[in-house]
Image (tube, coloured by chain):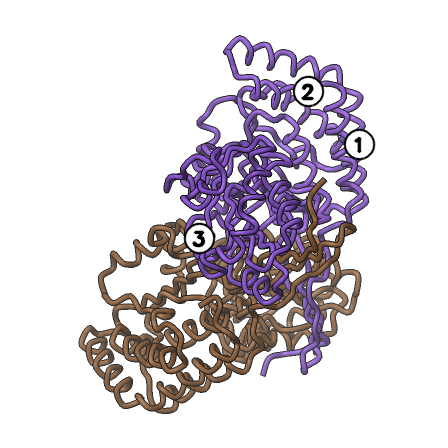
Chain colours: A brown, B purple
Amino acid sequence: MGLATAEEKDAALRAMAASIRSRSDAILAANAEDLAEAQAKGQIASFIDRLTLNPVRLEAIAAAVESIAELPDPVGRVLAGFERPNGLRIERVATPLGVIGVIFESRPNVTADAGALCLKAGNAAILRAGSESFRTSSAIADAMRQGLVSAGLPEDAIRLVPTRDRAAVGAMLAGLDGNIDVIVPRGGKNLVARVQEEARVPVFAHLEGLCHVFVHGKSDLDMAKGIVLNAKMRRTGVCGSAETLLVDRACAATHLKPLVAMLLDAGCAVRGDEAVQAADPRVSPATEEDWRTEYLDAVISARVVDGLDAAIAHVEHYGSHHTDSIVTEDQAAAERFLAEVDSAIVLHNASTQFADGGEFGFGAEIGIATGRMHARGPVGVEQLTSFKYRIRGSGQTRP
Amino acid sequence: MGLATAEEKDAALRAMAASIRSRSDAILAANAEDLAEAQAKGQIASFIDRLTLNPVRLEAIAAAVESIAELPDPVGRVLAGFERPNGLRIERVATPLGVIGVIFESRPNVTADAGALCLKAGNAAILRAGSESFRTSSAIADAMRQGLVSAGLPEDAIRLVPTRDRAAVGAMLAGLDGNIDVIVPRGGKNLVARVQEEARVPVFAHLEGLCHVFVHGKSDLDMAKGIVLNAKMRRTGVCGSAETLLVDRACAATHLKPLVAMLLDAGCAVRGDEAVQAADPRVSPATEEDWRTEYLDAVISARVVDGLDAAIAHVEHYGSHHTDSIVTEDQAAAERFLAEVDSAIVLHNASTQFADGGEFGFGAEIGIATGRMHARGPVGVEQLTSFKYRIRGSGQTRP
C-alpha cells in the first residue's frame, strides 16, 4: 500500500464512491436491520439519529470519499531538503504511517471517512465498528473493499473487524502484536477515555473540548458578542463549542451584562460567579465543577477574571488543551495569549467553532488531537503520514 | 520553560558549559569514585572506558553544550502558514514537546548532551543515569542546574533521578502519572528492548542498526569498494555500521571477489552464502541467524542476490528499518531502492556510516529512531518539538 501511486489511490477512492452508490439498496437494508435492533433495545432518539442512514446521507458519504480523491497526495512530499558540504543531498520525504486502527461507535459514516483518509495517506486501516452499527458498517466496508479491488489495490488495505465481540477492542488497543501503529477513537468520552487509558500504541484523540473564550479588557463589544454567540451556540454538541466565558474585569462594567443577556436570550443557560450572577437575575450560580464541565449543550459557565494573566491561568488550570480564543484589540495581549495558552488551537478574534479540519483547508479530518506527539489539532491526511530521509551521493564515505 | 526565550536558553547553555569547566575537579573526583567501584566489581575494559572521564573528555562535553547554544532556536519556527478564504490566517508553529525522560547507562556525557538538547527545545528533562555512573552524572547534573539558575531559568528543568534504585526506571516507563511525554533510552540493546517493551509512553529509539549495503549489477567497483569498506570498517561499534553485504548476481563475476578480499584483508571476518564462500577460501559459512545479527564488530554477513527485487526483499525481511544503502550507476534502480526500502535512512552511493545527526547538520542528536511516530532517523532539537495552530482573525464566526 505504501507504494501505491497517487493515481491508483485516487482511482480507488472514486471507485469506492461509485460502489457505495451502486450498493445503496444493500447498505440501506443493512442499516434498517441495525435500526430495528436498536429500536427494539430502546436506544434514545439521538443515538438512533446518529445510526440512521437515508439516501441523502449515503450520497453525502459517497461525495465525501470522492472529495478526498481531490486532495493532493500527502505521500512523497519533500518536507525538507538540504545539501551538505560533502555534496550529500538529504531530503526528508513523507511516507505512510503504517496501519491505523479506528474504533468508533454508532456513526456508520466513519467506516467510509476513516477508511478513505487512511487510504489517501497510503496506510492500511483496521476499523472496529460499534456493535449497533455493525451491519451497516460491514456493508459500507464491503463497498470500500470493492473499490480497492477495482483499482488494483489490495482489498485488505481496509478491513472491518469481523466480529461484534468486545474482546476485539482490547486486542486492538494492545496493538495486535505490533501490527497497529496508531489508534484513533471516534466516539463519546467513555470510548476515548478507555482507549487513552488502555492503549499500548499511540493514540490520536481528544478526551474533551473544554474551550474558552476570553473577552479582554480592550475588546470591541460587538465583535465579542458575535464571537461568543457563535462559539457557544452555532452548534453546541461539537468539540469546538465554547464551554466557559471569561470576561476581563477591566471591561466587565460595559461588556458583561450585554454578553450574558445575549446568551440567555438565545436560549443558553448561564452559570456564573457572583459578578456574573449580579449582571442578570436569570444566571444560576456556578460551582467549581462547572469550570471543569464540557456541557455539549446550550449551557455556559462564566466568570470575571482579573486581566490576561488570570485568564491564561484559568485556561491552563481548567482547560483541555483543545481550542481557546481571545477577543481583543490589544495586539500585545493577543500575542501573549497565543503564545502562553498551551492548546492545540489558539485563536485571536475568531470563534472556537473553527476547530475543524475542513475549516483549516485540510479537506477532511479523522479527528482532533490534543496530545503533543506527531499530530496535534485537526488530523488530516498530512498528519496520517510519517517520513524518512532519502540521501543521494556520488560515492561519499565518512571520514 | 516553554516560554523561555532563545536568549535565555542559550545563556543557560553557555553558563552550563562554564559551570562544567569550573567544577571539573569535583566532576573528575566523582568519576574517580565511580571508576573505583566499577573496577572493584570487575567490570570489563570497554565498560570502564565508556565510564571514564578525563580533562580532555570533560572539555569536549562542555564544548558540545556550548555548540548547542549556537543552533537556531527550534521553538517558534513557523512550520506552515496559510490564509483561508474567510481571512483567517492560520500558522502551525513549533512548541516544546514537554517533559522528556532519558534513561542511560554508563556514559556520563549523556547527562550533559541530553539535558542540553532537551533545554534547547524548551523541554524539561528527567534523566536516569546508570547506577555505575551515578556520582559522575550527579556532579554534571549539578553543574547543568547551576547554569539554569544563573540564566534565571528554573533549575528543575533538568533533574537527575536522585536514586540508584531500579524501581525508578519502572516509574519512568509508566510515565510518572502522565508527567513524562516521551522516553529516550540511550544504551545497549537490553536497555532499549526493556524500554520498548514496558514503556506506556512514546519512545524515540532504535533496537538495533542492522544496516545493509546492496552492490547493484550496474555499480562502479571502485565506488562500491570505498563505500563497503567505510560502511563496515570505519567504526564497527556504531549503529550505522553495515552488517550485511548484498551483491547482485549480475555483477558477482567481477565485483564479488574483490569486495570480499578487500574486507578480509582489512581484518573483517566474512560469513557468506555458497557463492561468497566460493569467492575466497577465508569466508566462513553464514547461517540463517547471521542475516539477523548486528555484530557491532569486524564481522559481516554477505550473500549474492538475484537483482534489485531480491535485495529489497532481503532488507525488508531481515533489516531493522534503520539505514540501508544501494551502490549503483542505474538511476531508476536507485530511485526504486530509495522508495521501496522502508528504513529511516536510505542512501544512494554513500556510506551507511552517515547515519548521524551531526552528519545531517542537526548539530547534535539525542539518538536515532526507527519508529514512524513523530521522530524518525536522527533525533535533533527540531524533532524534540511539537506544534500548535495559531489563528489570527478579525471577528470571524463560522457559518
Amino acid at the residue labelled 3: His
Letter of the chain that mark 1 sits on in the rendering: B
How far apart, in angstroms, are the residues tagged by discs 1 and 2? 21 Å
Q: In this view, does A264 lie above or below B178?
A: below
Residue in the image at 60% along x and 53% along y: A316
Write down the residue under mark 2: B53
Residue B352: % across, % down: 61, 46
Pointer 3 chain: B
Which marked residue is nearer to the observer: mark 2 or mark 3? 3
| Residue type beneath disc 2 | Leu
Choose the circle earlier in sequence order: 1 or 2. Answer: 1
Q: Which amino acid does label 1 sit on?
A: Ala
Labels 1 and 2 share a subunit: yes
Q: Left or right of A112: which side holds A29?
A: left
**Whole-number angstrom distance, CA of label 3 to CA of label 1:** 50 Å
Q: Residues within 10 Å of mark 3 (few under 14, many from 20)?
A: some
Q: Is mark 2 on a helix, strand or loop?
A: loop
Which of the two residues, B77 or A250, is positioned nearer the viewer here?
A: B77
Q: Residue at x 50, y 69 (%)?
A: A121
Residue ID for mark 1:
B15
Q: Disc 2: which chain?
A: B
Label 3 residue SS: helix
Q: Is residue B129 left or right of residue B96?
A: left
Question: Taking the image as drawn, is residue B179 in sight?
Answer: no
Question: Given contact means CB atoms under 8 Å apart, are the residues at marks 2 and 3 in contact?
Answer: no
What label does residue B314 carry, if any?
A: 3
Q: Is residue A378 left or right of residue B350?
A: left
Q: Can residue B127 be seen in this view?
A: yes
